[in-house]
Image (spheres, rainbow, N blue to C red):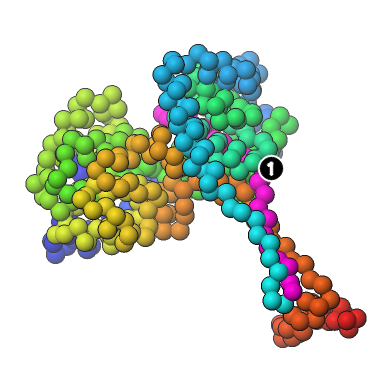
Amino acid sequence: MPLRLDSRDPGFGAAFTVLVDGRREADADVSRDVSAIIARVRAEGDAAIADYTKRFDRHDLDASGWRIDPAQCHAALDALDPDLRVSLELAAERIRAYHAAQRPSDSDMVDAAGVRMGARWTAIAAAGLYVPGGRAAYPSSVLMNAIPAKVAGVDRLVMVTPTPDGHINPLVLAAAAIAGVDEVWRIGGAQAIAALAYGTDRIAPVDVIVGPGNAWVAEAKRQLFGVVGIDMVAGPSEIVVVADGANDPAWIAADLLSQAEHDPTSQSILITDDAHFADKVCEAVDTQLRNLATETTARASWADNGAIIVVGALDEVPALSDRLAPEHLELAVADPQALFDRIRHAGSVFLGRHTPEAVGDYVAGPNHVLPTGRRARFCSGLSVLDFIKRTSFIALDPASIARIGPAAVALATAEGLPAHAASVALRLEKI
């Protein structure tokens, strides 16, 4: 059974803190294993990749092929059921439109001292995209990760995906074709992240790595941050659903299970001001679980990590939600905007009774790659900004350096850096 708390109980504060601080992520053994894999890939390159692929994915890269030809991706797209293709293309169109509006403008100005300064935004040259191929093989994630990179203007977009026993989901290939992925490699795991970061004889390195993966993939991204940029270190999926008693319990139950079915370590939390409604939701969850193809996963997640929090009033929600800083936050209440105005920390917020989180996973437009594990306190979802960088520029003429240069000399001298001071002062002497 999921954890059940009531904010009016004397022990609520301590119990809620335990819930907030609970960790569902990688342990020290994973970190040690990943470190060894990265070191071997850096030292041995393709030979290490081939060995790990044979061991973990049970196929020989030299026999099955290291790369998937773009023609195979387009063939997978052409072979799609027409209705499914329309759905993928609609999702891509909406994702592209939303992210196109995110690209910032360059700036260029001259201030009152006559100093010209500004910033120029440029895309990174190459990005790597990890696409899971085991429990999770999601074409929607291909679109969500690849399209912002292309909108940003990335020149080379490289997709790596494990192909267990040599097989790959054709929907993933079709999504790669729609999104404009340039290279697709049949490799996965921490070894694929290392290959993207350092490069091998076959695979040229990239500048940024994005995309979801298991604990080993997430840990590899964490360890290689600094060698390359990463989107974020992502943990198990999570959702907080805030719902009053006017909702249909079956709707809210389905929303909770939409995250629970991802993985046994996923977390679904219901916050409501109606204890009777909470009971109805629990009954609906039990009913729906019996009919889910993903019952085993969802049931384990709900039993081990699920929670129901009954509050005295919905006014308590913003403070509780901000402490959880959830990946997904649904506000299925009569006036969601009033609560949203008081929310500071959430990866993405879904407003109103007719806005299930699952719509955001596919066709709404905003990115579904979001911070987990309370990282929404300091991290945002994937965007075009993850694939571009800002370069500032400054231009002075004799008049402007004469105006601001003496202050630079004074500050450099105060900091005990005479060469800094001289590089400005020598120019001032000539003016």
Query: Is residue 4 depicted above or below 55 in this figure?
Result: below
Residue span colored magenta: 114-136
Which residue was labeled with disc 1? 125
* Nearest the eye: 279 or 76: 76
The residue located at (23%, 53%) in the rendering is: 335
The percent coordinates of residue 68 (x first, y second) are: 61, 21
Image quadrant in which the N terminus is located = top left
Q: Nearer the viewer, residue 252 or 398?
A: 398
Residue 419: x percent and y percent?
Answer: 82, 78
- Mark 1 lies on a secondary structure that is loop
Q: Would you say residue 295 sits in the magenta stretch? A: no
User: At 55% across and 41% down in the image, what residue appears?
Assistant: 148
> Mark 1 packing: few (<14 Cα in 10 Å), some, or many (20+)?
some
* 178 horizontally vs 353: left or right: right
Tell me which amino acid carries mark 1.
Answer: Ala
Q: Does residue 242 appear to the left or right of 386 in the view shown?
A: left
Residue 233 in the image: x percent, y percent?
49, 48
The reply to whether the magenta stretch includes residue 123 is yes
Residue 148 shows in the view? yes
- In this rendering, is residue 2 above or below 379? above
- Position of 366 with respect to 295 (left or right) is right
Q: Is residue 29 visible?
A: no
- Name the quadrant of the C terminus: bottom right
Is 162 in front, or is 347? 347
Residue farthest to the top, as pictured: 79
Residue 130 falls left or right of residue 426 = left
Estimate the x, y position of residue 410 in percent, counting from the top left: 74, 86
State the residue at coordinates (70%, 35%).
204
